[in-house]
Every structure is written in C-alpha cells, then in structure tokens.
Image (cartoon, rainbow, N blue to C red):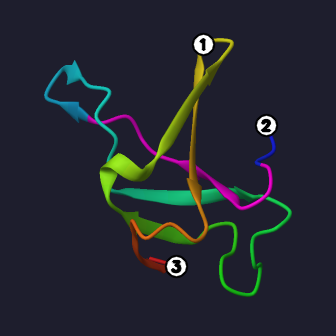
C-alpha cells in the first residue's frame, strides 16, 4: 500500500483494555510511508506523530486496516523521533 499525494501512512497499534480489543484509534502513530507530495525534509519514515484522534482516515483492504492523515492537517499536534 502506497499513500498518495499529501497523505502520510501510519502504523497505529490496536488498542486493548485488558483482554478486550477495541477499534479506538490512538492519538499517536509511527510513520511507515509518505505520499509523493509530502515534504520529506519535515517528516520521515519512523517519526512519531501526535494528532487528534478524529483526524485519521481508516481504509480496510483484504481484512487489513490502513491509517492515513494529511501532512497539512490542523489536527497534527507534534512530531518527532520518540
């Protein structure tokens, strides 16, 4: 899966509470791929993004979930390597 344009693809671990797994999207994710129009001087694969949970787009393909956010989203709060 390759993100398009200004999309950043994130790895967001599945949240679990005890033995119960939820589909709640965390407010933290690791960048795993960048769309061709994302400024690679600003964001890099492996960086961690902190964002408002409602800002993530979720797509499902062949039973797997993929998470994306726009690189210029006002819901992005912080980024870094940790």
Q: Nearer the viewer, residue 36 or 63?
A: 36
Q: Marks 3 and 1: which is nearer the front?
A: 1
- Residue 12: in magenta span: yes
What residue is rendered at 34% in x and 41% in y?
25
Q: Could you give the CA–CA distance between mark 3 and mark 1, rounded to whole angstroms? A: 29 Å
Give the answer, above or below, for where 56 lies relative to 50.
above
In this rendering, position of residue 58 left or right of residue 74:
right
The image shows residue 59 at horizontal and vertical percentages of 59, 28
Q: Are marks 3 and 2 in contact (CB under 8 Å)?
A: no
Q: Is residue 80 above or below residue 5?
A: below
* Residue placed under numbered mark 1 in the picture: 63
In the current view of this chain or complex, which residue is farthest to the left?
18
x, y percent for residue 41: 75, 87
What is the number of the mark on residue 1? 2
Q: Is 1 drawn above or below residue 51 in the view shown? A: above
Residue at the limit of the structure toward the right, as seen here: 36
Q: Position of residue 69 (x, y in %)?
A: 55, 54
Q: Secondary structure at mark 3?
A: loop
Task: Estimate how packed mark 1 is, as few (under 14), some (14 to 19) or many (20 or more) residues with alpha carbons within 10 Å.
Answer: few
Image point (46%, 56%), residue name: 29
> Which portion, as a residue range, is magenta?
4-15
Quick one: label 3 or label 2, which is nearer the N terminus? 2
Indicate the secondary structure of the residue bearing disc 2: loop
In the picture of the structure, the residue carrying the numbered disc 3 is 81
Q: Quadrant of the N terminus?
A: top right
């Amino acid at each position: 899966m390759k993100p398009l344009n200004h999309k950043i693809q994130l790895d967001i671990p599945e949240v679990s509470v005890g033995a119960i797994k939820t589909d709640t999207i965390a407010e933290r994710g690791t960048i795993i791929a960048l769309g061709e129009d994302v400024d690679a001087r600003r964001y890099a694969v492996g960086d961690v993004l902190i964002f408002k949970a409602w800002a993530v787009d979720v797509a499902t393909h062949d039973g797997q979930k993929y998470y994306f956010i726009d690189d210029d989203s006002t819901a992005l709060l912080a980024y870094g390597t940790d």
